[in-house]
């Protein structure tokens, strides 16, 4: 199971990095989502992997339990990365709609001077 | 427990939603509440700074959970002075944003402004590494809104880059925290320090990976080379009052480096010894060099000031990377100076851009050219580190602190030549923008009737307040110069406190009150 989880994290990260290096916004956002999935799984594994174990202590009998803290961390991380992805989708949509161009890089003619007029 | 500690976070956290939900259609009320909120924050910051000046470290346990299990806010001298700096910086900026009408060019400026302040203050006060991540996200998500405030296709494109870069940074932060948690089993900074010191020496590969990953994240925030690429485009395309506020954001990175690598991975911790300084110092030297060259090469005033921010981060991180008490004291003084000076230049750059566009090339004279050029001159002197203002003292302190370092001549050479190139670059910009505009060929032929009247009105709705705000920032720099003695004294005591992490650890873990 360790090998499976580790390779899943690795492959997702690799695919995410590949996509981040693309030229258009859409694959970049996909890549960012993949990397955040990878980091969520990674965080989940930081409390060690355990099968069939609840995340709470049982005070009546000795049963195995799993570390609850990473689960709380993952929850926070999921919410934040979800929100951030929504933000970047909105910003890149409006960037695309206002410039009719979804390249992630800025062209030479996109000089900072242009903002004086549209501000 | 002392409830003042959490007040710098609670005040903006209540005010910002209040502004969004209740005052969203009333710009005047938003402005009043926003300024009142910043003044209140300044009052709180002064109070907690006075409380921390005595030297006790105070702990605020959220939900009254004892230390390593719950999240703690910790108030020590460093946190207090950084919160105070945030409040001091925020006041002229919010006044300028109101006076220049920037807050009217998009929605929710003031709410986002206060969310940003909340994130920054939280990052300075927290004593928990994961909570630091959360506050980073709070300040980042507010900064995304502020950065694209006012819209426009270029700004939105720059915003996409900025958000993407920071999302990658946040992901790295999570990887780093996950690694550290897997090794140490804790995320409380003080508890982590204890656990790191107890680790067996042969089982530290993963810990070192985590420590370096964390350094990488803070370097992205602090715009250290080669991770600085987000900064020039983002700052130059953001509304410039917002860019002035962002001057504190790079300092959040510097603060985090200072905090984590004196407390959890301190200089005397064996497993990470020398690791951070060895990587950070060359990077900081190159940062300063590239910043200075960028100042010289910029064709646009906003870009030039963005490179000023990078160069000053270089100087600051050189001081931090020495990890000695004197160097840290110098760094703390320089943090104050460089934040105020960068913000001042961004505000002056906004005045210039509103009047004649930002290109560094001669154009016909603009209204209030004399006053603005004087302000630019003051800001340039401060940033380049010329004598009358605090930049000189700051740079001198950094140079002096580097005297005992092994590669002192490299450090001195880079700082001195970097300062020289900065002076040349700023002088070039000032000459082209302010002096050449008066050259004969650019003067329009004088027309008889309006020869006497002042040519053009100022573009700000309220130029008086705008200039007052900028003079407020100048006043901050002058005060920092005049009261350099007390400020240094405080910085020295702060550094002393930072390099005795035992006090911090026992204050946090020492049990309930």
Image (tube, grey):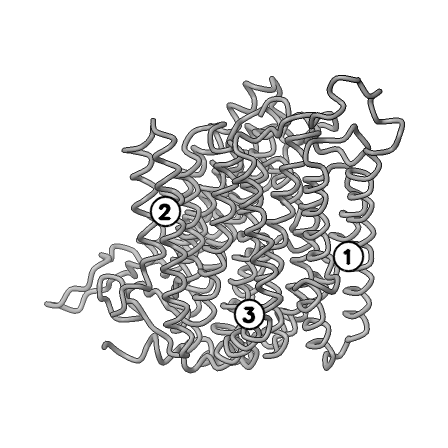
Residue lying at 57% horizontally and 54% vertically, measured from the top left: B250
Mark 2, Cα crowd under 10 Å, few <14 / some 14-19 / many 20+, is some
Q: Nearer the viewer, residue B137 or B436?
A: B436
Q: Position of residue B225 (x, y in %)?
A: 69, 54
Residue B359 location in percent, x, y?
A: 75, 33
Q: Does residue B293 appear to the left or right of A112 in the view shown?
A: right
Residue B87 drawn at (x, y percent): 45, 55
Q: Nearer the viewer, mark 1 or mark 3?
A: 1
Which of disc 3 and disc 1 is earlier in sequence? 3
Q: Nearer the viewer, mark 2 or mark 3?
A: 2
Per the image, the residue denoted by label 2 is: B36
Image quarter hosting the C terminus of chain B: bottom left
Label 1–label 3 contact, CB within 8 A? no
- Quarter in which the N terminus of chain B is drawn: bottom left
Counting other residues with Cα less than 10 Å from the Cα at mark 1, is it few (<14), some (14-19), or many (20 or more)? many
The Cα–Cα distance between marks 2 and 3, rounded to whole angstroms, is 50 Å
Secondary structure of the residue carrying numbered label 2: helix
Mark 3 element type: helix
- Say whether disc 2 or disc 3 marks the residue closer to the N-terminus: 2
Q: Could you tell me which chain the residue with mark 1 belongs to?
A: B
Circle 1 sits in a helix, a strand or a loop, which is it?
helix
The residue drawn where x is 55% and y is 55% is B217
| Residue topped by disc 1 | B289
Look at the picture and state if B171 lies above or below B300: below
What residue is shown with label 3?
A: B205
Relative to residue B288, is residue B121 drawn left or right?
A: left
A62 is higher (above) or lower (below) than A34: below
């Amino acid at each position: 199971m360790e090998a499976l989880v580790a390779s899943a994290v690795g492959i997702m990260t690799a695919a995410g990095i590949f996509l981040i290096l693309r030229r258009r916004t859409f694959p970049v956002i996909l890549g960012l989502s993949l990397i955040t999935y990878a980091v969520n799984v990674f965080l989940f594994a930081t409390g060690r992997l355990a099968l069939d174990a609840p995340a709470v202590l049982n005070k009546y009998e000795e049963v195995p339990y799993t570390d609850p803290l990473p689960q709380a961390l993952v929850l926070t991380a999921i919410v934040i990365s979800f929100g951030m992805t929504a933000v970047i989708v909105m910003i890149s949509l409006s960037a695309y709609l206002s410039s009719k161009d979804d390249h992630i890089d800025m062209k030479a003619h996109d000089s900072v001077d242009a903002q004086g007029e549209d501000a | 427990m002392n409830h003042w500690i959490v007040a710098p976070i609670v005040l903006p956290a209540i005010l910002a939603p209040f502004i969004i939900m209740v005052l969203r259609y009333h710009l005047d009320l938003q402005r009043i509440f926003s300024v009142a909120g910043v003044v209140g924050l300044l009052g709180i910051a002064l109070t907690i700074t006075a409380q921390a000046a005595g030297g006790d470290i105070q702990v605020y346990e959220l939900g009254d959970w004892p230390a390593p299990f719950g999240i703690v806010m910790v108030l020590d001298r460093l946190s207090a002075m950084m919160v105070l700096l945030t409040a001091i910086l925020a006041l002229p900026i919010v006044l300028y944003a109101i006076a220049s009408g920037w807050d009217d060019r998009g929605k929710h400026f003031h709410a986002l402004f206060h969310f940003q302040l909340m994130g920054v203050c939280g990052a300075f006060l927290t004593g928990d590494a994961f909570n630091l991540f959360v506050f980073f996200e709070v300040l980042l998500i507010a900064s995304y809104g502020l950065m694209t405030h006012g819209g426009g296709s270029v700004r939105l494109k720059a915003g996409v880059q900025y958000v993407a870069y920071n999302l990658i940074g946040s992901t790295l932060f999570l990887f780093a925290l996950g690694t550290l948690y897997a090794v140490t089993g804790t995320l409380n900074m003080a508890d982590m320090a204890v656990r790191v010191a107890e680790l067996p020496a042969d089982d530290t590969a993963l810990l070192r990976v985590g420590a370096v990953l964390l350094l990488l994240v803070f370097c992205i925030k602090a715009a250290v080379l080669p991770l600085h690429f987000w900064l020039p485009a983002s700052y130059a395309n953001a509304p410039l009052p917002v860019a002035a506020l962002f001057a504190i954001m790079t300092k959040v990175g510097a603060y985090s480096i200072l905090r984590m690598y004196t407390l959890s991975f301190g200089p005397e911790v064996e497993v990470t010894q020398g690791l951070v300084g060895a990587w950070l110092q060359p990077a900081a030297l190159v940062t300063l060099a590239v910043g200075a060259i960028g100042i010289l090469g910029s064709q646009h005033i906003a870009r030039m000031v963005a490179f000023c921010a990078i160069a000053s981060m270089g100087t600051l991180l050189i001081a931090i990377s020495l990890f000695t008490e004197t160097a840290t004291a110098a760094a703390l003084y320089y943090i104050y100076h460089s934040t105020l000076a960068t913000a001042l230049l961004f505000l002056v750059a906004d005045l210039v851009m509103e009047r004649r566009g930002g290109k560094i090339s001669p154009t016909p004279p603009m209204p209030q050219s004399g006053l603005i050029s004087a302000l630019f001159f003051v800001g340039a002197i401060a940033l380049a580190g010329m004598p009358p203002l605090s930049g000189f003292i700051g740079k001198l302190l950094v140079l002096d602190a580097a005297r005992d370092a092994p590669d002192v001549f490299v450090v001195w050479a880079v700082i001195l030549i970097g300062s020289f190139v900065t002076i040349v670059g700023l002088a070039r910009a000032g000459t082209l923008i302010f002096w050449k505009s008066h050259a004969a060929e650019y003067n329009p032929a004088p027309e008889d009737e309006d020869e006497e009247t002042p040519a053009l009105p100022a573009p700000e709705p309220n130029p008086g307040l705008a200039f007052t705000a900028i003079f407020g920032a100048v006043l901050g720099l002058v005060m920092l110069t005049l009261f350099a003695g007390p400020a240094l004294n405080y910085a020295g005591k702060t550094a002393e406190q930072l390099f005795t992490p035992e006090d911090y650890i026992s204050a946090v873990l020492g049990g309930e009150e």
